[in-house]
Amino acid sequence: MTRELLFEKLWKNYTDQNPSVQKVYNSFTELNETVLNDHIAFRTFNDPRMNISVLEKPFLEAGYVEKGQYNFEAKKLFAKHYEVPGKPEEPKVFISQLLVEEFSEELQKLIKERINSINNITYQNKDLIFKGNVWGKPSYTVYNRLREESEYAAWLYVYGFCSNHFTVSINSLKTLNSIEKVNQHLKDKGFKMNTSGGEIKGTKEELLQQSSIMAEKVQIEFTEGTYEIPACYYEFAIRYEDKTGKLYNGFIAKSADKIFESTNFYKK
Ligand code: NI
């Protein structure tokens, strides 16, 4: 599948599931801004049936190559990022995986039960990254039990395989050309910012600054009934040039660590 088609399909799934992200996008285009995408991100379990090596396949086939690796010790995650060589303007891809064996026996059992509940053929499908929740109705009790140890695990248990966020490249904006202006614009429109570690993650010196809005809450059907929980979010990133004049293209683990919290459960 071409990169163009990949991103088109992912964007459609993302906006269908999270109506508010289209509103965010439109709030920029209404100001005559051109919205380019800095990166998208996926989450998965480190099970060999669906780990990073599985989810990266469609991107490798579309011309992406691995460019960086990241460890998140507190959240027990490992991640890689990918770029299209020679095309720094194309969106990067960030894939993280939960290190399941580092959690309690109970969490491991709950995750394994869900993963094992379907045929392995599903995981071998090339379209897995578009499939979302492949496991059927989740349990609200299990969702909340997983949250006690890992908000990431709970989110993944419910939503499965989809782009967890898209990211507006602030570098491509003409009027809202700083992260401070973008954040103010979002707050004026009534969006709730992720304030974990401060509204702005990273510094100019680190060559990458990021912010995000908290994931929109959507109605999910659980085996126990319908409950409203956070889905996907929108991120905003501005990149700076290094001493050689080259735009920084990597990620900062301690900033990403806080951005992950954009899907944490929250009270309205
Ligand atoms: Ni991101």
Image: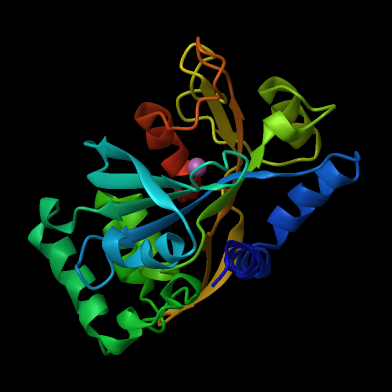
Going by the image, does 89 lie left or right of 117? right
Position of residue 215 measured from the top left corner of the image (x, y, whole percent): 57, 51
**Residue lying farthest to the front in this orientation:** 86
The foreground one among 24 and 85 is: 85
Q: How is the image coloured?
A: rainbow
In the rendered image, which quarter contains the N terminus?
Answer: bottom right
- Residue in the image at 22% along x and 69% along y: 111
- On screen, residue 148 above or below 210: below
- Residue in the image at 50% along x and 73% along y: 130
| Residue 35 visible at all | yes
Position of residue 184 measured from the top left corner of the image (x, y, whole percent): 75, 27
- On screen, residue 177 above or below 226: above
**Residue lying farthest to the left in this orientation:** 105
Position of residue 129 measured from the top left corner of the image (x, y, whole percent): 45, 70
- On screen, residue 191 above or below 135: above
- Residue in the image at 26% along x and 54% along y: 98
The foreground one among 132 and 93 is: 93
The foreground one among 210 and 266 is: 210
Going by the image, does 213 lie left or right of 132? right
Position of residue 135 measured from the top left corner of the image (x, y, whole percent): 36, 81
Exactly how many numbered labels are in the figure? 0
- Residue in the image at 28% along x and 69% along y: 50
| Residue 147 visible at all | no
